[in-house]
Amino acid sequence: AQSVTQLGSHVSVSEGALVLLRCNYSSSVPPYLFWYVQYPNQGLQLLLKYTTGATLVKGINGFEAEFKKSETSFHLTKPSAHMSDAAEYFCAVQGDEKLTFGTGTRLTIIP
Amino acid sequence: DAGVIQSPRHEVTEMGQEVTLRCKPISGHNSLFWYRQTMMRGLELLIYFNNNVPIDDSGMPEDRFSAKMPNASFSTLKIQPSEPRDSAVYFCASSLKGTPTSGELFFGEGSRLTVL
């Protein structure tokens, strides 16, 4: 069975600072990994995904994530935080036909 | 292009009442997923359909919950009788090709259910 663990349920960064949201996965097969973002009172939307190929994946809004098999990690980063990045972020791993989501990390941006 | 449409957006009901949540997936998508989101449990997959057929309902909490997909453009999630612990945001999501192999699920805006 596949699973993901998100370290830190809440992360606060200053505007303009680096954003780093951590995700570790467990999978018995080569994983497909995803980051989704949820803005208040909205559904989730895809930020980026890793399936095969290049391990550094670029997504929308300046986010990127790097798949590190040796560390079983798929951390999400953004060089410079913007106020509009305040949201909840979910890491997910695909198993069979289903996505299993992490518990989410709420990102707060400090002006 | 319309996204996934859910109704109602908000529902407040009393314990014991029947609740029906509705979802219209994106046209052309042939997989549909129902998720529940709570503070305590996060996002839980309740059930998913491929080509209108239920594939895995192992996430459905108990017999009080049922879901149907009578055609490719409509699905319902029913709770009867409802209980306060069912209070949550229920999301419907759809995807293409029968499996989320691309992982891109398209979510509706959710139905916030409060059971008093």
Image: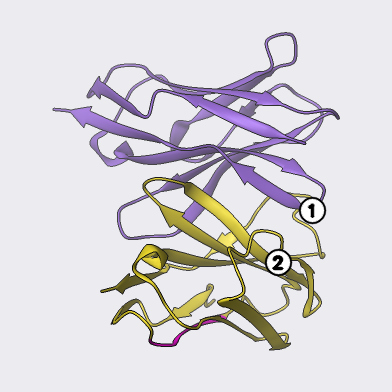
Where does label 2 land, which residue? Answer: B48
Query: Pointer 2 indicates a residue of which chain?
Result: B
Q: Identify the residue at the far top of this view.
A: A70
Q: Which residue corresponds to the image point at 37% horizontal and 29% vertical from the top-left?
A: A9
Q: Quadrant of residue A89?
A: top left
Q: Are marks 1 and 2 on the same chain?
A: no
Q: Residue furthest bottom?
A: B70
Please state the extent of the stretch shown in magenta in the rendering.
B17-23
Q: Where in the figure is residue B93, as x and y percent of width and height? A: 59, 65
Secondary structure under tag 1 reads: loop
Determine whether the residue tagged by mark 2 lies in a helix, strand or loop.
Answer: strand
Tell me what residue is drawn at x 29 percent, y 82 percent: B14
Question: How many dots with numbers?
Answer: 2
**Quadrant assignment for the N terminus of chain B:** bottom right
User: Few, some or many C-alpha atoms within 10 Å of disc 1 (few <14, some 14-19, many ≥20)?
Assistant: some
Q: Nearer the viewer, residue B34 or A65?
A: B34
**Residue A104 falls left or right of residue B107:** left
Task: Return the residue at label 1.
Answer: A97
Q: Which chain does the yellow colour mark? A: B
Q: Is residue A16 magenta?
A: no
